[in-house]
Image (tube, grey):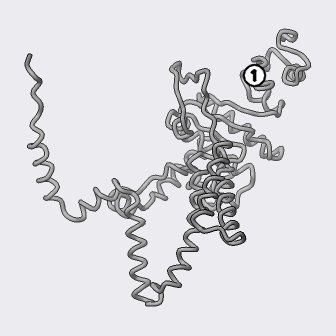
Amino acid sequence: MTAPVSAPAPATTAAEQFARRRQSPLQRVQHLLPAHPAISPLLVLVAAAVVFSLINPRFAAPNSLSLVLQQVAVIGALAVGQILVILTAGIDLSVGAITILAMMLSAKLAEGNGVPGFLAVLVGIAVGLVAGLLNGALVPDAGSILLDGEPVHFRRPQDAREAGIETVYQTLAVAPALDIAGNLYLGRERRRPGVLGSVLRMLDKKGMRADAAKALSDLGIGTLQNTAQPVETLSGGQRQAVAVARAAAFGSKVIILDEPTAALGVRESNQVLKMIGEVRARGLPVVLISHNMPHVFEVADRIHIQRLGCCAGVITPATHTMPEAVAIMTGATTLAETPGR
């Protein structure tokens, strides 16, 4: 028996080392920073601290550093809560509330009850973990999910998004302080080409705004002309339009809409229903979760009725009327007793 001959690894390693030595310092930095994203902001912070210390020697005094650390701790804890909300794609907005709960509990124990700081922090973290476990994302332990006929397993919302499934939540999950383009590309930000993007990590705002305007135009949304406009200045219907446009721009398999018209007026609700029709006309499947029967019967091809966590029946607007659907949903009758037309 002959053993397989492997490629000469030392030669390859030597070639790589030679190529690395021929790189300029700027090229080395360009390769280093993308591989370690945390280095860039750290270098900026260190440079800022050095500059401030040179401008004002009192900046590095113990009292000043203590105040800076106190402010950074509060802002950092809030940022962690908001980042968790964004990473979960709005699936559970109470994640931020859990972070605040842990912070307030730790502060109360340390300040009002004389508990040592490290112990107060541990208690706060423990309470946050318990609340997070009780309120965490649900992962199915039975049944199966099929996508294009193939079984899939999603452990986190990002897995579903990578598979082409986009969701518009009832809480919208938009960032009010960002502009329209920033919300459409939230979590998918594009960087500028070359050194500006790889080293300085600058965003391609011009390109994102142009593509955001095209995505809105493709859905027939004519009320949003300026994609640089902050979302906090928009009406409820316009914010819903931004969320739907984001789902339509990146959803390639299915779009799920969770009560998209629950908090909207008549005019804004009609605008959202029109957008749903535009998305469906593009051949993209839409799952609409709603208790508003007129809206359901207006846009649905097939209606899946849920009752007490189970499927009470699947009907269509052509076979059943709205009162019959409500009766099946409330338990006044069953699908077998109301076979339809």
User: Is residue 109 or residue 204 the one in the foreground?
Assistant: 109
**Residue 51 drawn above or below residue 309:** below
Q: Quadrant of the C terminus?
A: top right
Q: Residue at x 39, y 87 (%)?
A: 54
Q: Is residue 287 left or right of residue 23?
A: right
Q: Is residue 148 visible?
A: yes
Q: Is residue 341 visible?
A: no
**Residue 304 drawn above or below residue 202:** above
Where is mark 1, residue-wise? 310
User: Is residue 139 or residue 301 the one in the foreground?
Assistant: 139
Please tell me in which quadrant of the rendered image residue 5 appears.
top left
User: Is residue 28 or residue 113 the one in the foreground?
Assistant: 113
Measured as percent of width and height from the top left, residue 35 is found at 33, 53
Measured as percent of width and height from the top left, residue 31 is found at 28, 56
Q: Residue at x 38, y 64 (%)?
A: 40
Please tell me in which quadrant of the rendered image residue 33 appears.
bottom left
Measured as percent of width and height from the top left, residue 92 is found at 66, 45
User: Is residue 126 or residue 256 the one in the foreground?
Assistant: 126
Q: Of the residues shown, which amino acid type is indicated by label 1?
A: Cys
Measured as percent of width and height from the top left, residue 277 is found at 69, 33
**Residue 33 drawn above or below residue 164:** below
